[in-house]
Image (cartoon, rainbow, N blue to C red):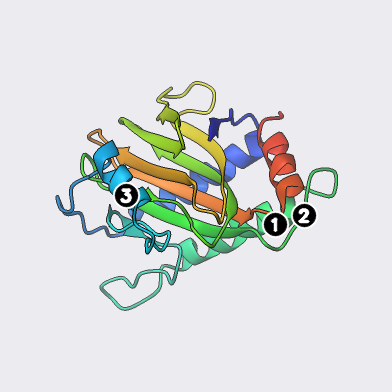
Amino acid sequence: MKQIPIKNIELLKRLDSFTSILYQLPHTFRALPKADLTFATLKTLMADANFVGYPKTHNYQSYEGEVAFTRSGKYKKRLRTEKYFFLKYMQYGMGEHYQQHAKWYYDTLTVMPPRWGNTGWHNSKNKGRNYIRFIHNAGSGYSISVKEKNQVTVKDQRRGNMGAGNWTCVAGHMGEDGKTWFADHNTGSRPRAVIDVSIPERYTKEWDSAIKFITEY
């Protein structure tokens, strides 16, 4: 996993628009389950041959599937629109000069509650992917990746109105062999939005080109 700077202004505008809708949706926040991102837990999971690859625990409101109903029973049409067009932007909007591929998909689309929000340890076993994870947080939080004895931790960036604002972007590879583990935690007093767009691991060229697009003005 590595942190990459978001320099593309058009992309930042789209991210801001997308996240403004995510924050407006009704959220059900609970204190449990608490984050368990200890290395003792990770060691136990690593030794579990039956671990399926998905986090056993998490605490967030998820939107990557069907859009949640409002109390009036109507879909949030704008969120459906934002989801559709942002994914199409990742798939085709960068142009042939960078990359175009239909295999990009949402792995995670969520709002994490303050203090309690987290994604438990997982390794995407049997579903290898290259990911680009956009994180918006006006508080504090972090992402952590572990492969064998190598650990990388990236703290959420908070810049206010400067540069990429309160956006953090991390990119990484999680092979189907399950050797790379990931978790994250919202530790601050503000909600934390996460937009993880992934592509199957064999499309490394497209992933590299998307990162280049994100980091160029």
Residue named by callout 2: 100
Where is residue 139 shown, x and y percent of the image?
30, 31
Residue 133 lies, in percent from the top left, at 51, 44
Quadrant where the C terminus is found in the figure: top right
Mark 3–mark 1 distance (CA, rounded to whole Å): 28 Å
Q: Nearer the viewer, mark 3 or mark 1?
A: 3
Q: Are marks 3 and 2 in contact (CB under 8 Å)?
A: no
Look at 53% across and 62% down and name the residue there: 126
Q: Horizontal and vertical percent for residue 144? A: 40, 35
As shown in the figure, which amino acid type bears the numbered disc 3? Gly
Report which residue position mark 3 lands on.
Answer: 120
Q: Earlier in the sequence, mark 3 or mark 2?
A: 2
Q: Residue at x 45, y 63 (%)?
A: 64
Q: Secondary structure at mark 2?
A: loop
Q: Residue furthest bottom?
A: 73
SS at badge 3:
strand
Residue 106 placed where, x, y %? 53, 59
Q: Residue at x 84, y 49 (%)?
A: 96
Closer to the chain start, of discs 3 and 1, is: 1
Whether residue 164 sits left or right of residue 98 in the image: it is: left
Res. 205 visible in picture: yes
Measured Cα–Cα span from mark 2 to mark 1: 5 Å
Residue type pointed to by label 1: Gln
**Foreground disc of the pair 3, 2:** 3
Q: Amino acid at mark 2?
A: Gln
Dot 1 corresponds to which residue?
91
The residue closer to the viewer here, 63 or 4, is: 4
At label 3, counting other C-alpha atoms closer than 10 Å, the crowd grade (few under 14, some 14-19, many 20 or more) is many
